[in-house]
Amino acid sequence: MKDVARGRPGSICRLAFGVLHPPPRLSASVRRRTSQESAPLGRSHSVKESLLTMSQHTPSPRRQALKLMGVASVAALGSKESSSQSQTPYGAAAAACKADTESTAGPYPNISAAERRDLRANTSGNTTPKSGAPLTLRLRVLDLENNCAPIPGAVVDIWSCEATGLYSSYAPFGTQGQNFCRGYQKTGADGVAEFLTLFPGSYSGRALHIHFSIQSAARNIRPNDDGRNLPDVFVAQLYFNAATADEVFRSFPIYQQGAPRTRNEADSIYASDGGAGYIVQVSKSGNAYTGTIDVGVRRSAIGMGNSQNVTPLVSGQAQTVSLGLRQSRLYSIQVPPGRRQLKFQLSGGTGDGDLYARLASAPSTTVYDKKSDGSSNAETITFASPVAGTYYLLLNAYAPVHNARLLATLS
């Protein structure tokens, strides 16, 4: 069996004016990065929060993904200029796509995420909503390999601090057992996951930000995991322009109880991880705010299979397969009722192909019903007494595969 921690090269490309450039080849020796975001120390109610010394942040090229950029940046809230100019409509076609790196999950990712829209309060114990500026956040997930079509059914998970800079669920803040400003939603048919949360507060060394991940199922991320090193999970951080932050801090005095604000340009993670590409477009209505942003990903990068067409398999008819390094291909076969066995076999040729199978939906290298991932092209997956339905098979080239034979057999 192969090393569990085997890596996957980046899916970085740049899409501009309809031209798609292929990803660069990366060394197979690239390994997991060390943590990039330091953890704030605990504080008493009378002492402003401090941070442990920030670790040196060295960006890794290992896995990058694309985020769609808005046509125009947000004008300063409350200014005469913003009242006379309309903002770019949410969901408008992007003027360009820019290659943006993923980022660290930070020291306080979700450890017990709940599926919910309103994140302003705990789900148990003291359920009074936390004080702060209400923020309706709409994050739309788009398929970069399918003309930026919405991706429904993706799990979008967000977590952030409250108005004074405290994260829930962690001992340094005395918030164990609490889960304010944490939760996930699944994207709808329009690709949108919507949350009602709080505009994030400030703590030392970091600009105002909201962490998020996109994946196929709700799974916990470990502290300081890095999205570039996680297969099938997209991890990054959202930021806000200075005019928006200034307006919020003026309107809601509770934000002054946190540490002095760090500007975006003074945040090393913002600078090294393409933070300028993750500025949320914000509008205000009364005392509430609405933020919108589009994020473009590859389905394979979030564990939801490939955007390419599914290749049908016919029982007893072998197919010859060749794939480049880390390339994959998705297959399917219909299994009628009453069959005793379904078998997938890969054999012959050269290289190292792996098989992942799943009933009813596309598998990935981390989400599957069965897998076979030996060190050659000799792979077999067998379902005894298979349930009737559509079975999907993902063939992933851990090493380049040339002239291998793929066969599905129903008996």
Image (cartoon, grey):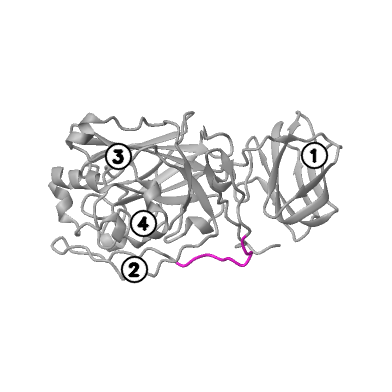
- Sequence-wise, the earlier of marks 4 and 1 is 4
In space, the residues marked 3 and 1 are separated at their CA atoms by 58 Å
Quarter of the image with the C terminus in it: top right
Give whichever of discs 3 and 1 has the lower sequence position: 3
Q: Earlier in the sequence, mark 1 or mark 2?
A: 2
Q: Nearer the viewer, mark 2 or mark 4?
A: 4
Please state, as top left, top right, bottom left or bottom right, where the N terminus lies in the image. bottom right
Magenta part of the protein: which range? Answer: 26-34
Give how far apart the Cα atoms at labels 1 and 2 are: 56 Å
The amino acid type of the residue labelled 2 equals: Met
Q: Which residue is mark 3?
A: 74
> Any mark on residue 341, and which?
1
The amino acid type found where label 3 is placed reads: Val
Label 4, label 1: how far apart the Cα atoms are? 52 Å
Residue 54 marker: 2
Residue 88 versus residue 73 in the image, above or below: above
Characterize the local packing of mark 2: few (<14), some (14-19) or many (20 or more) Cα atoms within 10 angstroms: some
